[in-house]
Amino acid sequence: MQAILVIHNLLRWAVVLFGVWTLINGLTGYFGKRSFTANDNRSNLFFMISCDIQLLVGLILYFNNGWFARLKDLGNNMKDPYTRFFTMEHLTMMLVAWVLVHVGRATVKKAGTDVAKHKKMLIFFGLAIILILASIPWPFREAIARPLFRTS
Ligand code: HEM
């Protein structure tokens, strides 16, 4: 499980990078009124793929590293911010972000004009990356702090 945890830790940087790249494309696309290009499509796709892999790795950790088992004693566990974060908050927020990314990609594809595509991109992927950034256990978040780069 330690190797899986290292993967989940480091893969976060791919999610963050592709998410920010997508957000920048959405912003420059919408406010710069430029056409929707292959580069826009690529950033969305890479963001979605990185989220998919991260979800899979996260679920492995959730079910095999004792977090799911802690749901049994929900009452007591909810009182502890650390356990509450990893059993409920992290999972829920990241799942919502994952849904936004998938619905976002389908909505962008369907949108008729380039302006509409960039607008949808900005809304769906923008919200998703904000949720993701807010739900990462950054080292400065006292009760739930985890390292920026885990190697073992
Ligand atoms: C897509 C965005 C996600 C990002 C960026 C992310 C990021 C992270 C980071 C940075 C950690 C700390 C790793 C460490 O201690 O070194 C972590 C822990 C964890 N994540 Fe995620 N995560 C995401 C999605 C998910 C999802 C969807 C699940 C699903 C259940 C999940 C489950 C977990 C669990 C259970 C831990 C605690 C691991 C342990 O200590 O056993 N994550 N996550």
Image: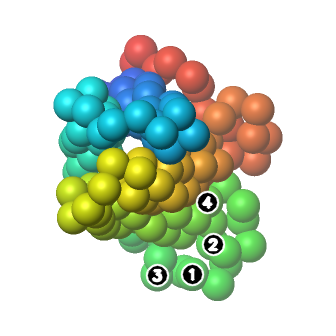
- Helix, strand or loop at mark 4: helix
Q: Which residue is drawn at the image coordinates 53% and 34% (left, top)?
A: 32
Q: Name the residue under label 1.
A: 74
- Marked residue nearer the N-terminal end (2 or 3): 3
Q: Which amino acid does label 3 sit on?
A: Lys
Residue 125 in sight from this viewpoint: no
Q: Which amino acid does label 4 sit on?
A: Phe
Residue 32 in sight from this viewpoint: yes
Q: Mark 2 points at which residue?
A: 77
In the rendered view of the protein, which quadrant contains the N terminus?
A: top left
Tell me if label 1 and label 3 are in contact, CB under 8 Å: yes
Q: Distance between the residues labelled 2 and 3?
A: 9 Å
Mark 3 surroundings within 10 Å by alpha-carbon count, few (fewer than 14), some (14 through 19), many (20 or more):
few
Residue 137, above or below 77: above
Q: Which amino acid does label 1 sit on?
A: Leu
- Marked residue nearer the N-terminal end (2 or 4): 2
**Foreground disc of the pair 4, 3:** 4
**Foreground disc of the pair 2, 4:** 4
Tell me if label 2 and label 3 are in contact, CB under 8 Å: no
Q: How far apart are marks 4 and 3 (CA)?
A: 15 Å
- Helix, strand or loop at mark 2: helix
Q: What number is the disc on residue 72?
A: 3
The quarter of the picture where residue 42 lies is: top left
Q: Name the residue under label 4.
A: 85
Q: Where is residue 7 in the image (x, y as percent from the top left)?
A: 31, 29
Q: Position of residue 34 (x, y in %)?
A: 41, 34
Tell me if label 4 and label 1 are in contact, CB under 8 Å: no
